[in-house]
Amino acid sequence: MKSVEKMPTAKSIPELSGNIEGLKRHSFMCVFVPEPSLSSDDRRIRAWLLHTVASASRHYARARELVELQDNVNQLRDGSTIFHILDVSEQIEDCVTATYRACMAIRRLESRREAQIFSRDYKNLIEELRSIRNQFDHMHSQVTAAETGGGPISIVFGDEGKSIKFRKLSMSTLSLHALIDGAYRVVASLYPAFDVNSTKEAGGPIRLTITTSITVTDADGNTR
């Protein structure tokens, strides 16, 4: 008898601990600090990588948040059953796409020791992610040809959240988490003044406060 797939639970999906929001704020402040050792192309590549890893992190965190909201649904309290779980696939799919792009870009940072170590240590996980991403990227042609095959045709959480699944492919959620965290650490290494192990900060818009002061000196040399 085929077992029934259980709903994912937040406790099976590890939280990200990297301070990606703090790194984004730090990168913004770097705009005002001269970095003569970096070329214009280096700055652009660094900014793109940060944007991509931040996107992967946010989609992962949102997917987990939606699962947690589903965990806490109470029909008596809420007056109805709410299906937060229906929006999870979109977040996982965007997370997989962004994570894959970041991994491919990091592979090409051959001059960076941190990038070399990442590509070496996570080689097998990157290949697992590549298989899922590539099949997902070409799913539209199979759907239009009515060749949907077996397994889910959206990327979903399986095994109560311990894995992500697409068609007959799967990888552990812990592996996806490790790739995002590893990519964050590579990008953080591109900002030497940033503490990669700093406490995780909340997201939100970057705020810049500017204060001014005026000193007036009169004809007698008095200032006020």
Image (spheres, rainbow, N blue to C red):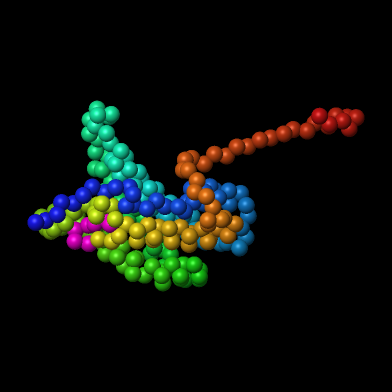
Residue lying at 45% horizontally and 52% vertically, measured from the top left: 17
Residue lying at 38% horizontally and 67% vertically, measured from the top left: 122
Q: Is residue 29 magenta?
A: no
Q: Nearer the viewer, residue 151 or 99?
A: 151
Looking at the image, residue 217 lies above or below residue 197: above
Q: Is residue 201 left or right of residue 211?
A: left
Q: Is residue 218 left or right of residue 157?
A: right
Looking at the image, residue 37 lies above or below residue 66: below
The spot of residue 64 in percent (x, y) is 34, 47
Chief secondary structure of the magenta portion: strand
Q: Which residues are magenta?
A: 163-169
Residue lying at 50% horizontally and 46% vertically, measured from the top left: 201
Image quadrant where one finds the C terminus: top right
Residue lying at 61% horizontally and 63% vertically, measured from the top left: 37
Q: Nearer the viewer, residue 160 or 145?
A: 160
Q: Residue furthest left?
A: 1
The spot of residue 35 in percent (x, y) is 61, 58
Q: Is residue 182 left or right of residue 64?
A: right
Q: How many marks?
A: 0
The spot of residue 74 in percent (x, y) is 27, 34
Q: Residue furthest right?
A: 220
Q: Is residue 10 visible?
A: yes
The spot of residue 188 in percent (x, y) is 51, 58
Q: Is residue 167 magenta?
A: yes
Q: Nearer the viewer, residue 24 or 160?
A: 160
Q: Is residue 7 left or right of residue 114?
A: left
Report which quarter residue 159 is drawn in.
bottom left
Looking at the image, residue 75 lies above or below residue 189: above
Image quadrant where one finds the N terminus: bottom left
Report which quarter residue 168 is drawn in.
bottom left
Q: Is residue 155 visible?
A: no
